[in-house]
Image (tube, coloured by chain):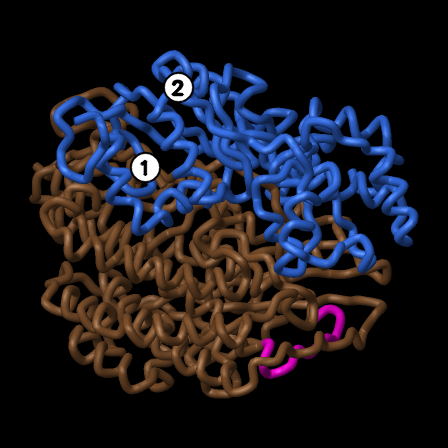
Chain colours: A brown, B blue
Amino acid sequence: MGKSTSISVHHVTRVEGHGNIVVDLKDGTLTRCELQIVESPRFFEALLKDRPHDEAPRITCRICGICSVGHATAAIHAVEAALGIAPGPKTRALRRLNMCGEWLQSHVLHAYFLVAPDLFHAPSVIPLATTHPEIVRRALRLKGLANEICYAISGRHVMPISYLPGGMGHWPSAAALEVLHARLVAARADVEATVELFAPIEWPDFSQEIEALAALEEDGAYPMMGGPIHSSRGKVFAPGAYREASAEHIVDHSAAKHTRGADGPVRVGALARFQLAHERLGPAARQAAAALNLSPATRNPFHYTPAQVVESVQAFEEAITLTELLLGDPSPEERAPVTRPRGGVGVGLAEVPRGTLIHDYEIGSDGRIVRANCVIPTAQNLAAIEADMRAFVPALVARPKDEITRAMEMLVRAYDPCISCAVHLLDVSFVGQGHDGGAAGPESPTAGGRG
Amino acid sequence: MASPTPTPAPRALPKAAFFSFASCEGCQLQVLSIEDQFLTLLGAIEIVNFREAIDDRRDDYDIAFIEGSLVRPEDIEEIQQIRKRARILIAIGACACLGGVNAIRNKRSPAGLAREVYEGRQDGVFKTLSEASPVRSVVQVDYEIRGCPIDRDELLESLRSLLAGTVPYVPPYAVCVQCTMRGTPCMLERGLPCVGSVARAGCEAICPAFGAPCEACRGIHDSPNFEALGEAFFRHGLPRYVAAEKLQLFNNYRELREPWEKALPSPSIT
């Protein structure tokens, strides 16, 4: 007789937004395996309709507090594409520096605050403050540093302010850049210690080949500021053809749309970027990958976290280089002019911490937004997360229910899903027949809790 | 030994819980962003429910922090439960205090919105109230910490005063006051649609300093003159209805909308 188990984790913790995991095993056969997205719908695409185009970065950054610089970046790219605006090199450097701040902030938050508690068998970062104070203090210092970058450039990290079509509404002074540079250089030991912390971790052994996507910049830089979408299947899609790379569709159990690639689920984010663009990493990030034993051949989703650590090193080193570049000529750059005042369609991409973010706007001749579509990295990853859950559960069937639950939560968390973004949504739920003979229905909200 | 310290205090710490309704969770992130003060905060309050960061979920809290606006029928029931359990209920951020950006849609029908964004689906997952609403439209709110997002220093200051048993200070005057003090050139005089003259201060006028007009994310101050705002827009070459369009961004919940709707021409956007 096979085993029947029903797992239901209501509102997965330590992820951004509200989601449930539902796993149903009947006589050893997996009958249901879903990541239900239950975040409240907020209708951002509809909110943008008829709004003046310059508001787009300020409205869409409110889709998500963690990815707000990423949304502002994709939004300004879409506006500039629609209006034929080509910002100058210093503006592009300043915006990239701000993205380095967001990558560092988001990756550090995920690795230290959300994943590390699993590694130290703690329910949250809070007990770690007592058991491992030096680790928590380091995480807070690095997060603080990442925030400093964004404060200097866009006033704050959550809801960045200064994104204007063609330029930036604020230029950091030479003195501010010097302070930032000194703080960055002084933090190198913390970045190296982060690599050392995660290097000895044995990640769960699991692997599944899934198509990887990332928008690669045409100048050979590590993917961050958008470009044609490259697939691990060898295909390349122009930004305007994003629907061919990643097509949105609606599923019943999710307020977040799913997307699928040419032959099924796709992975985006740190692991996909590392797979497709590891050759573009700088020397320090390559050394980190070697220390973390992370190979571009890996197809293990638990490796999202070490890939984020590698990218933290990359973002940190780039932040130093970009600050030096901007210090070389700290005078503000003029905003670039509109060359297509009658408007049109513009697709803007950015590689945000969780993957390829796509904003697609149509702007009318009155400068107002006629139509908007936002394709979110977590929405693109949802099908892959479910495919990985389906592939991973059979290997765990013999284990106690608590362990299966914990493994499912860790798997979902590995992708660092950003549910606010995806609905513009996490909970785990094993429903159906319990192996203890329990009745159908979601279990108590603490069913998936650890500790 | 009454003062909170990072070491275990001899007396029981007030228990705090964080709840999130429709929002970007950016205000919770601001709580995590107090970095150097975070460990001190942990010495002053015990966090018993904070889904974004911890696994524990307990219902024995004294202080409830609410982020986000109420948009689904079940939100109403949940906030009422929280109100029953909490001794002090604090709304944080524009979504919870005002309705915020979620309320931009408030004059449109939920069915029409679902048609636009989710191909018409309006089942259990997507069921929404006709208006995105601030927390105080449903339950009594004891304190509000304003802003989109909340300011981390202001959050700490508010917690300090609450723990000391005093009421956190909310400036009653306009963003223009702080903008002038900061020395930022006037946005309206540069032809930009700024509503700072009716907007509640407390933000140090950060948006104009970073190149964007004020959009009143902290709500309206105690004595606004919307007619004068429309006049000022007109004098600087901006149609009066544009002032109304700007106020739609954060202050579009019914009760907040009514005063400016009477004084200004209708916005071109529904």
The magenta-colored residue range is: A81-91
Which residue matches tag 1?
B51
Type of amino acid under label 2: Ile
At 34% from the left and 14% from the top, the residue drawn is B85
Is A402 inside the magenta-drawn segment?
A: no
User: Crowding near pointer 1: few (<14 within 10 Å), some, many (20+)?
Assistant: many
Under tag 1, what secondary structure? Answer: loop
Q: Is residue A89 above or below residue A52?
A: below
> Which mark sits nearer the N-terminus, 2 or 1?
1
- Label 1 is placed on what type of residue? Arg
On residue A434, the disc is: none
Q: Position of A373 compared to B65: left or right?
A: right
Q: Is B245 displayed left or right of B27 in the figure?
A: right
Q: Are marks 2 and 1 in contact (CB under 8 Å)?
A: no
According to the picture, the residue beneath numbered tag 2 turns out to be B88
Label 2, residues with CA under 10 Å away: few <14, some 14-19, many ≥20:
some
Query: Is residue B32 visible in the rendered structure shown here?
Result: yes
Question: Looking at the image, which is closer to me, A210 or A45?
Answer: A45
